[in-house]
Amino acid sequence: MKEYKLQGVSCANCAQEMEEEIKKLSHGENTELHFSSSKLRVEDGVDLNQVRRILKTDGASLIEDEGNSHRHGSNLRLFVILSSLIFGATFLLQGIAASFLLISMYVAAIVISGHQTFWKGLKNLVRLKFNIDTLMTIALIGAVSIGEWKEATLVAILFGLNEYLEGLGMEKARNSMEQLLKVAPKQATKIMEDGTEKVVAIEDLQEGDIVLVKAGEKIPSDGTVASGHSSVNEAAITGESLPVDKRPGEKLFGGSINNEGLLRVEITKAYGESSLAKILQLVEEAQERKTPTELFINRFAKYYTPLIMVIAGLVIVAPPLLFAASWAESFYQGLAVLIVGCPCALILSSPIAILSGITKNARNGILIKGGAFLEQLGKIESMAFDKTGTLTKGEPKVHAVQVYEEEKFFSVARAIERHSSHPIAAAILDYSLVQEADVLEPSSVDTIPGKGIRAEIEGQTYYVGSEQTLDHLDLAQELQGDIDRMKEVGYTLVLVSDEKAVLGMFGVADEVREESRTLMQRLHSLGIKHTIMLTGDHEKTAEKVAGEIGVSDVHAQLLPDQKVEKIEELKKKGRLAMIGDGINDAPALTMADLGIAMGKGTDSAIETADIVLMQDHLGKLPHAFRIAKRVNAIVKWNISIALGLKVFALLLTIPGWLTLWFAILADMGATILVTLISLTVLLMKE
């Protein structure tokens, strides 16, 4: 399918109608017209001239030249300014010029500002299709027919201004998203097999290619540093502003900027599979996913416009028939009802705010896969967290040491753990006193499944592992007390012993992330009622971490299927989000009302999740929640403003106070307010 950018698409319903018309063309059945991103996707066989004709009927067009992409908005602004000047001139000529000249000037102003709306409205009337343009066209014809030239001109000018501002607001939100999507590099300098350099398109890069990235250039796709040393700005991916030092062997994100040194990068993923490509795809797809509120508003708007026409008809007919009111006055009031009933503000109450919220979060490295998930995030009452790798770093550290025989303890531990690939072995080898110990070489090393390691060193047998490696010893009461105390604190124990005695033990624990210590407090202050930690670790370890970070509830020793059962149980108490990073979290992420994955976690967790945090921490989660709550509040405010002003204006028809002037000002005021309030999301600070 081919993709084209559009201009002049400022109405969601109009976009839907144009899509339906294009689908009727030959080869057009798979057509997609996206209002939020203002893009059209059509099959190669579709007649573009026919497409242009359909778009033109609604004032839209294909952007053939990027330089003219704002021409539609500029033309509309020019029409509004020109017709306003003509309208202003009529006041200066009042009482001087002949009435024929003044009427000609009114007509000129109406035609210049309202011709597009008028023609669309006339076509709709012929087809018996009722929308905003139909309402405005009937109002214009009615005002002119009763000689209200000033009001008719004002209706045309202010509706034109309304359309311009409406398009400007949507364009502002779209441009913000466009800037986000421009982070993708277009080319890369590939080092060929003979050592020469060649500039290639990033789409042509394959896994294993070596590219050269100079200072200030973007890294074209995910890869690792083959040679060189530099600091890299990963803000486009993770939202983190501080540069990260990169050395040979370290991973790089495509779209990151090389700040200073010269890097040779080995590509590990073709661009289409890279983190950046997935991010941009998710962001684009997210724009078009409607929230439940948006879907309701769109359904409501279909019935709303005909309903307004019925009300306007009753306002025209009922007072003269029932109360002997003037037909002229009732007709005037009916026209005002048509104008004030325009659903522009109501239709715009949600999409600009939603698009702004998705864009703002994406700039912070938080990918929300659709407006529905943003809306859901703002309604979340409880959050469940996986422990390892989410609230903790997933990297065990030695936190406590108990030594009984210092001469042998550290050297034996170093000699044996060097032969293990277990993360806990790495933690022990990283301990400073172990690194300083004498280097011994075991003559044999055997694994004791589920217990630890047995080794022969200088003719003696030594054991390193859990309590179960001490089966050959009778433990003194004091030693057992030391073991129990360290377990009580929540440490995982690694004991070192020989055939006769325990030499000492290490207390190992996963390290809590720094931001986890304040995270729960921030979430609770924003309105999250319950924070829950789910883990497969034993209770003492879980309680130790929970005590440090301040979660509301802890559920330990859970297998993946038990996590899912626990999520089902917790969902019954209120809307629940699950945050995790591993393969074992994927089922729980799916089961929760909202799944949130750490971006540096496993692919399965990221694909399953509704929201992805591209940082390797949860520090930005409270801000994402705050944005979602703001967006939900703004949508509610917008709907209240849009409907409230209309109800107020309609009530003015009872005493006969509603004028065309007030009707158009109320409608335009509501649209401007809704647009400006929605765009404030982009200005939110952390």
Image (cartoon, grey):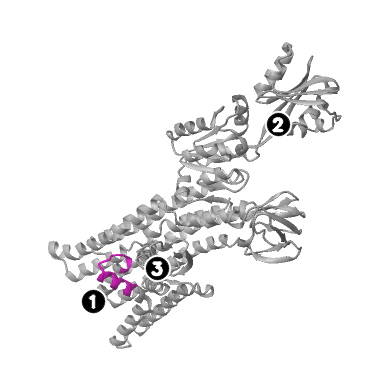
Query: Magenta stretch: dominant SS?
Result: helix
Three-letter amino acid code at disc 2?
Ile
Badge number at residue 162 = 3
- Say which of 41 and 307 sits in front: 41
Quarter holding residue 197: bottom right
Q: Which residue is mark 1?
A: 145
**Tag 3 near tag 2, CB within 8 Å:** no
N-term-proximal mark, 3 vs 2: 3
SS for tag 3? helix
Q: Is residue 392 left or right of residue 384?
A: right
* The residue stretch that appears in magenta: 117-133
Badge number at residue 344 = none
Residue at 62% across, 47% down = 615
Residue 508 vertical placement versus 27 (above, below): above
Labels 3, 2: front one:
2
Residue 308 is inside the magenta segment: no
Quarter holding residue 125: bottom left
Q: Residues within 10 Å of mark 1 (few under 14, many from 20)?
A: few
Q: Is residue 4 visible?
A: yes
